[in-house]
Image (spheres, rainbow, N blue to C red):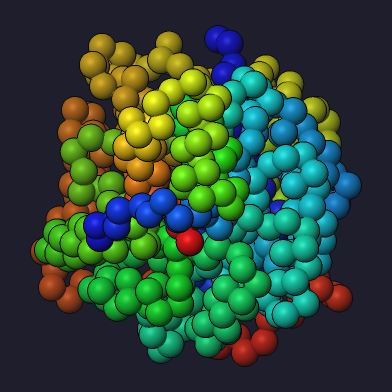
Amino acid sequence: MTAPRPYALLAEITYRCPLHCPYCSNPVAVACAVLSGEQARQPSSALRTAHATANNGELSTDEWRRVIREAAALGVLQIGFSGGEPLVRRDLAELVRAAREANVYTNLITSGIGLDDDRVRALRDAGLDSVQLSFQSDEADLADEIAGARGYERKLDAAAKIRAAGIPLSLNFVIHRRNIDRLPQMIELAETLGAQRVELANVQFYGWAFLNRAALLPTREQVDRAREIATAAKARLSGRIDIFYVLPDYYETRPKPCLNGWGQRYLTVNPIGDALPCPTASSAIPDMRFENIRARDLDWIWRESESFNRFRGTDWMPEPCRSCPQREIDFGGCRCQAALLTSNAANTDPVCTLSANRAKVDAMLRVVNSARDHACEWIYRENPKTLPGSFQPRGIMEQRRSG
Amino acid sequence: MQTPAIADSAQPRLAKGVRLQIDSATGKNVVLFPEGIVELNETAHEILSRCDGRTFSEIVHSLAEEYDANAAALAADLRATLSDLHRRKLIELT
């Protein structure tokens, strides 16, 4: 089918990160390859990425400049610089400048770790439009426990620096079982820090979060209360702070309209240059082969590649999606979730109650809603090696392992 | 929060982090903001492109002249549109 034009590029410029959040959506295999060189010889896309990342196969500044130009030419109007922690790359401001020169709106999605005065100034001078600063919780002890590293105080400092530089600030909270009861305090923190926008996004289960589902999924009671709190705060702060509350989709009866359709509006380029229809596709869909920007231009990949075309439109859909009146509304849900839960990315998203596989979601809901004291340990994200001469995180706490 | 009535001397400007530009893929005017893109119709564009430090009265006169319209009627519509844009945080009022 004919490819539409994309609106936004997610530029995952590195998988390196000073934090170890157990819900990170980066491929788990990146850490596996760091731990075991053997696995990296397997042909899976995620492992190939992992191997290359561990060996500093990241795209160069010039390669990213080319990606940005080609994305703008395709119609991209917004770029999110993400990771890993994008500040780990010293050329971040140069990439922001390249995006601004291509007339693209620039968002930085960051933990704030490593954001000193010089870098804030460099990013502002390069034309950075907006910063989304992640917080694990509203108070230091819990936040640092979740991150598996001390970072909370530095985040407060980063927020102040961003505000002082006059760059619009959004706060991003990933919500899960351990912090969902603190929504009011999180919203209060956003007010205190002068954020324009807050995302309270329940964790979605990909990457590390998929491994840690039982520890991260909130109870139904928690979810209902959180929804009320978010709705009330939205009304109270209307016109001052925009609040976006994202539900945990396991509690929904119809799937989310993932990506607004595969290959319709969004594309991702990962640290080694694989162009992906979705950032989690490389790890969730093992039988899909992704094209690399070192071998092909972005225009060809977007329009012609098998990976971008496989789930475009509605022709690929099986029943019950094929004849469903909602097929152009939710697009059958999420391909990665279908792959992770049913081992077939072409199945209906099992969140849908019309899916033959809905029982797999319900089984997980039963686990977290019945056992009062079910195991809450999680596995922390392992990180690719930090390369010599690059940013070295300080004060990493001992990693806690569940077993 | 109720948006207060916009005074004649108010100066609406694009809010911090909001950019007005042409979408080169379609030639249409769009506003860009964190995680958002809105395609503008001609009226919205004519208004937003004047939110550059001019006062409300000056914008009314400029639009009345351009469209050969009645300034009083136009002022009421403009007030409603700017209130909406303000509520959506696309403009700031000083």
Q: Kindly identify the residue that appears in the image at 77 percent across and 63 percent down.
A: A125
Residue A73 or residue B92, whichever sits in front: B92
Q: Say if residue A38 shows up in the picture.
A: no
Q: Say if residue A78 shows up in the picture.
A: yes
| Residue B54, x across and y down, in percent | 56, 49
Q: Quadrant of the N terminus of chain A?
A: top right
Q: In which quarter of the image is the C terminus of chain A?
A: bottom left
Q: Is residue B17 left or right of residue A329?
A: right
Q: Is residue A182 left or right of residue A232?
A: right
Q: Kindly identify the residue that appears in the image at 61 percent across and 65 percent down.
A: A167
Q: In this view, does A173 lie to the left or right of A231?
A: right
Residue A75 or residue A51, whichever sits in front: A75
Q: Kindly identify the residue that appears in the image at 18 percent across and 33 percent down.
A: A353
Q: In which quarter of the image is residue A142?
A: bottom left
Residue A220 or residue A8, whichever sits in front: A8
| Residue A327, x across and y down, in percent | 31, 20
On screen, residue A54 above or below A205: below
Total count of labels: 0
| Residue A301, x across and y down, in percent | 70, 25
Q: Kindly identify the residue that appears in the image at 56 percent across and 80 percent down.
A: A160
Residue A272 or residue B41, whichever sits in front: B41
Q: In this view, does A246 lie to the left or right of A29?
A: left
On screen, residue A226 above or below A210: below
